[in-house]
Every structure is written in C-alpha cells, then in structure tokens.
Amino acid sequence: MIEIIAISALLVAIISVCLNFYLMRKPKSDYEEKLQDLQSTFEKLNANLEKNLKDEFFRNRQEASKNFKETREEQAGSFRAFNETTEKKIDRLRETVESKLKAIQDDNTKQLEKMRETVDEKLQTTLEQRLGSSFKLVSERLEMVQKGLGEMQSLATGVGDLKKVLTNVKNRGVLGEYQLENILEQILTPDQYAKNVKTKAGSAGHVEFAVKLPAKSDADEILWLPIDAKFPLEDYQTLIEAYEQADSGLIEKSQKVFAKRIELFAKDISEKYIDPPNTTDFAVMFLPFEGLYAEVLRTVGLFEKLQRDYKIVVTGPTTISAFLNSLQMGFKTLAIEKRSSEVWSLLGAVKTEFENFGGILDKTKKKLQEASNVIDQAGVRTRVIERKLRDVQALPQDKAARYPDDI
C-alpha cells in the first residue's frame, strides 16, 4: 500500500511539472488562471494524499498493533506451554534423581556398614597384634635399657679406673708404653726390637724400647735406636681448657708451660739413652695421642729445637708407624745387601754349570749327527737292495703265510 501511495505522489509531481511547463508557453493571463486552477487542484490532491497517507499509516499501525498483540499472545501461550512442559519434565527428573539418590544412599549405607564391620574386625585384629608386639618390644627395650644401665655402670667404673690411671704419673707412663708396644708388635718382628734396654754405659736408666738396627757385617755389634713414651697430661689439659675459654693470655702461658715440659722430656731422654756408637745419634719421643703431637707441631720452633739441641725426634701414633715402616724397608735393603755376595757366587756357579751343560749339548749333537749319518747310509743300502729285487716275483699272501716269520 505504501508503494501505491508513493507512486501516486510521484505521478502528481510529474503532472505538476508538465502543467507548469505547458502554462509557461501560454499567454500570461491564461497562465495565471491556469496556475491558480492548477494550484487549487494540486492542493486538493495534496490534501487527499495526506489524508490517504494518514489513513494508511493509521491502518498500518492498527494492523501492526494487532499483529504484535497476536504474536505476543501466541508467544505468551507458547512460553506458558513450554514452562508447563519444562516444569513437568523437571518434576519427573527430580523424582527420578531423588529415587536414584535414595537408592544410592541406601546402597552406600549398606556398603559403609559392611566396610565398618570389616574395618572394625581388621582394626581389632591389627590392634591386638600391634599392642602385643608393642608390649613385647617395650619389654625387650626395657631389658636392653636395664642391660645398658648395667653396661653404663661398668663403663662408669672403667672411666673411673681410667681417670685414676691418668691422674697417676706412673700409670700414665704405663699407658703410653702399652700403646707403643702394640705399634711395635704390629710393624716389627720380635727380634728387631727389645724392651727395657740399657743403652748408655754408666747410666742407670733403661729405655722402654730400643730398635735393633742391622749391622753391616755379622762381626759388628748391635746398634740401638732408643724410643721412649711420654704423656704430659696435666699440662695438655690446662692448655685445652685455655683454648675452650678463648683466653689469649692463658693460652700463651699454657703453651709455654707445655713446651717447657716437652723440652724437659727431650733433655731427659737425650742424657739417659743416647750413647753413640752404641746407639744412634738421635732418639725418638713417642706421644700416645695425636693431639699432643699436633700441639708440639703447632708450637713454633719447638720441633726443630728438640732435634737441634737434644737430638730428639717427636712422633705420634701415626708418624711412628710411618717411621717404623721406613725402618722395616731399610732392614730389608740391608739384608739384600748382605746376601748380594751369596747371590753373586750362586750366579757364578750357575754360569759354570751352564757352560758344562753347553759342552754336553755339543757332544750330544755330534752323537745325534753320527747316528743320523748311519741311518742315512742304511737307507741308501735299502734302496740298492730294493732295486736289485725289483724283478723278483713276490709270493702270494697264502703261500707266504706258510713260511715262518723269521725267514
């Protein structure tokens, strides 16, 4: 309808333009009259067109409103039907889910009850076993604790005895001597060292141990290497306490006292036991703990002073083992030197016998050559005889068997 109205308006406009063009070609008086008529006609057409447009727009609005209303009512009905259908489906789904959930809950309750019964049974059994084993373990541990207490009491007694030993100077000396003897037994053979040896003539002192250095010849006398154990416990304990207190003044004072004690030990060993040529021109001071030996090395110049002024070499448990091992290698070297002349004589005798053996081999070779020549001659004679007997007819096997084998 809107398209028809638009076409009508277009036709009116075209007619108006044509009339204006026509009137322009007429005289002016006619033109004005016609123009007025045309204007009145155009106004009527325009009024009719506006009225028709308004009527058409009004009808369109009414139809659109009616259509919208019908569509809205239809959609509302569809939505109501959809809501009702959806609610029904949701209700059925809820009922189904509730029934399924109730069935699952019932099944879970049954399963949980069974699991609870099984767990209770297993837990009861396991608990009884664990409690039994725990009580048994606790009883065993209590017995072990009681036994350990007894051992600790024994250890405390032993520590007390050790403390008594360490607080007594003579007993401390015995401890160092015992440790030194164990090291000597592990490295040297019994005939390579001796115990409580008087190494210096005119001296009443006996060194705790002396190593026998092998002589260069059997006619030489034994050369002793004195080894004496020392244990300055009180001075070392005082020095350790000074280190723990971190008192520099006390540390310096304790170091001086300790160094003085070691120097007195070295002087005593040097005066009592070193006596060349009966002994070596030096002796060994054995300190039974590595801490003591480390403290001697830590004191600047002490180790060198003992060697220079008193001819004393200070060793600890580790260093004396290395020292004795080097002596053992020296023993083996000297033994090889002593036996080298015997080995040389033996090699000379072997050489002589080998030369005799070479002469015998030459004679044997000659005899074998003569025998080979004789065999070659016998082979030549055999081939000559075979050529001469080549024309002689051989007897058959059955006839040859009649003659004895010695023919």
Image (cartoon, rainbow, N blue to C red):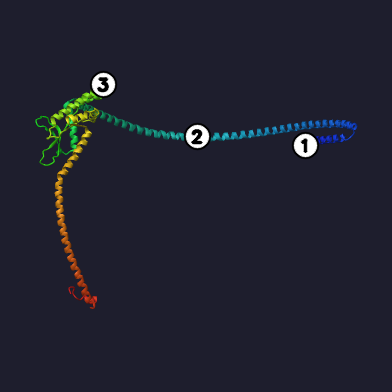
- Secondary structure under the numbered disc 2 in the rendered image: helix
Q: What quarter of the picture does the N terminus occupy?
A: top right
Q: Is residue 395 left or right of residue 105?
A: left
Q: Report the Cα–Cα distance between label 3 and label 2.
A: 87 Å
User: Which amino acid type corresponds to the residue marked 1 in the rendered image?
Assistant: Glu
- Secondary structure under the numbered disc 3 in the rendered image: helix
Picture coordinates of residue 21, whole percent (x, y): 85, 35
Picture coordinates of residue 277, whole percent (x, y): 12, 35
Kindly check if marks 1 and 3 are in contact, taking CB atoms under 8 A apart as contact. Answer: no
- Residue 106: assigned label: 2
User: Which amino acid type corresponds to the residue marked 2 in the rendered image?
Assistant: Asp
User: Which residue is at 55% across, 35% downward?
Assistant: 97
Residue at the disc numbered 1: 3
Picture coordinates of residue 202, whole percent (x, y): 9, 30
Residue in front for this viewpoint, 168 or 195: 195
Residue at the disc numbered 3: 249
Q: Report the Cα–Cα distance between label 2 and label 1.
A: 74 Å
Q: What quarter of the picture does the C terminus occupy?
A: bottom left
